[in-house]
Amino acid sequence: MWPLSCGLSCCAIEMMHAAASRVDLDRFGCLFRASPKQSDLMIVAGTVTKKMLPQIITLYEQMLFPKFIIAMGSCAISGGLYADSETVVPGIGSILHVDAEVYGCPPPPEDLANAILDIQRKRGGST
């Protein structure tokens, strides 16, 4: 898996922590990429605002096939604390197909690693 990180708020810190030495996503073959044209997994970590949504959709459309999405954190899944705001999207799953959700505010980095391993199993890759 080559994830494209969309770190939009505090959950991005936990996503970076998952790539650090304790969890170490590299040992699962998960190498973060900076380009959507080299990525097959998008990790949406944090609050998605309506102003940011067109950029996220553009990045998703530029990704390789097959492509997967992980919604990380309460804000990415359901809008979180800001769900009543008119500027916040009530979950990225209402716009794009989400393959895995990592629950919590903020979620532990180990749960992100488990979600990535689940997607690898779904697509038939090695773990």
Image (tube, rainbow, N blue to C red):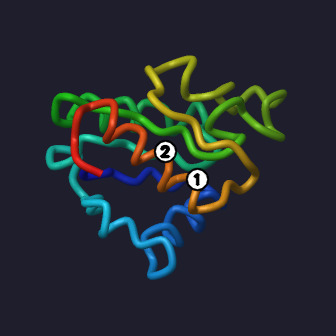
Looking at the image, which residue is at 44% across and 28% down?
99
Residue closest to the eye, 46 or 113: 113
Up the image or down, 77 lies above or below 2; here it is above
Q: x, y (%) of residue 68?
A: 34, 33
Q: State yes or no: discs 2 and 1 in contact (Cβ < 8 Å).
A: yes
Describe residue 25's horizontal placement relative to residue 65 as left or right: right
Q: Residue furthest bottom?
A: 21
Secondary structure found at label 1: helix
Q: x, y (%) of residue 10?
A: 66, 61
Secondary structure found at label 2: helix
For disc 1, the neighbor class at 10 Å (few under 14, some 14 to 19, many from 20) is some
Quadrant location of residue 9? bottom right
What is the three-letter code of the residue carrying label 1? Asp
Looking at the image, which residue is at 58% across and 31% down?
50
Describe residue 4's horizontal placement relative to residue 70 as left or right: left
Numbered label attached to residue 56: none
What is the three-letter code of the residue carrying label 2? Ala
Q: x, y (%) of residue 24?
A: 41, 72
User: Could you give the CA–CA distance between mark 2 and mark 1, rounded to whole angstroms?
Assistant: 6 Å
Q: Which residue is mark 2?
A: 115
Up the image or down, 41 lies above or below 25; here it is above
Describe residue 72's horizontal placement relative to residue 4 as left or right: right
Residue closest to the eye, 28 or 89: 28
Up the image or down, 33 lies above or below 124; here it is below
Looking at the image, which residue is at 33% across and 37% down?
121
Quadrant location of residue 31? bottom left
Q: Which residue is mark 1?
A: 111
Looking at the image, which residue is at 37% across and 29% down?
57
